[in-house]
Image: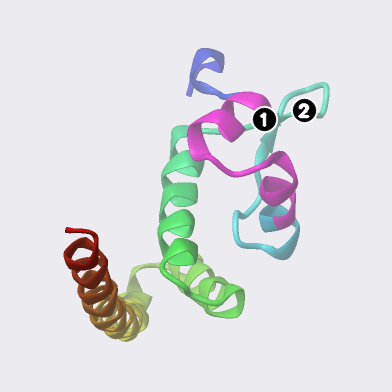
């Protein structure tokens, strides 16, 4: 990888949408893994780091607890032989996401009913 393909921490923040504190935290607890450093000691993020951060963002924003994200990260680092376990983690999480969506749809129906009520009341 050439130097021009590395991103500074500020660029990684901009690209990932995470704060610098979150990037440091994720690296410290092992979610991000070891980020390369320049000879001066500054973090240098790769495209692979950004792709992994995108996955972490997806998991976090869909409600996966940090502990489960860490478990998934450990499985990824353990290699291809963990594909079945990774699949199980993601399938279980997907079921939870589906349940969240169903709950939100139910709540949205109630909101739509109330909107209808107020629109009718105003006419």
Mark 2, Cα crowd under 10 Å, few <14 / some 14-19 / many 20+, is: few
The image position of residue 60, as x and y in percent, is 49, 64
Q: Which quadrant of the view contains residue 122?
A: bottom left
Disc 1 is placed on an element classified as helix
Where is mark 2, residue-wise? Answer: 42
Q: Which mark is residue 115?
A: none
Establish if 18 lies above or below 11. Answer: below
Q: Is residue 12 magenta?
A: yes
Magenta-colored segment: predominant secondary structure:
helix
Quote the CA–CA distance across marks 1 and 2. 8 Å
Q: Nearer the viewer, mark 1 or mark 2?
A: 1
Asked if residue 103 lies left or right of residue 36, the reply is: left
Q: How many marks?
A: 2
The image position of residue 6, as x and y in percent, is 55, 23
Which residue is situated farthest in the right direction here? 40
Establish if 80 lies above or below 11. Answer: below
| Point 22% across, 72% down: residue | 117
| Point 26% across, 79% down: residue | 110
Which residue is situated farthest in the top direction here? 4
Range shown magenta: 8-25
Label 1 close to label 2 by CB (< 8 Å): yes
Where is mark 1, residue-wise? Answer: 9
The image position of residue 116, as x and y in percent, is 18, 68
């Amino acid at each position: 990888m050439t130097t021009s393909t590395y991103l500074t921490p500020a660029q990684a923040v901009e690209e990932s949408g995470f704060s610098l504190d979150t990037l440091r935290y994720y690296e410290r607890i092992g979610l991000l893994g070891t980020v390369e450093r320049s000879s001066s000691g500054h973090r240098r993020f790769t495209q692979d780091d950004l792709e992994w951060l995108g996955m972490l963002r997806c998991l976090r924003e869909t409600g996966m607890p940090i502990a489960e994200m860490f478990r998934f990260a450990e499985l990824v680092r353990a290699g291809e032989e963990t594909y079945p376990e990774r699949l199980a983690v993601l399938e279980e999480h997907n079921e939870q996401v589906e349940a969240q969506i169903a709950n939100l749809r139910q709540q949205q129906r109630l909101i739509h009913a109330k909107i209808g009520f107020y629109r009718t009341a105003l006419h």
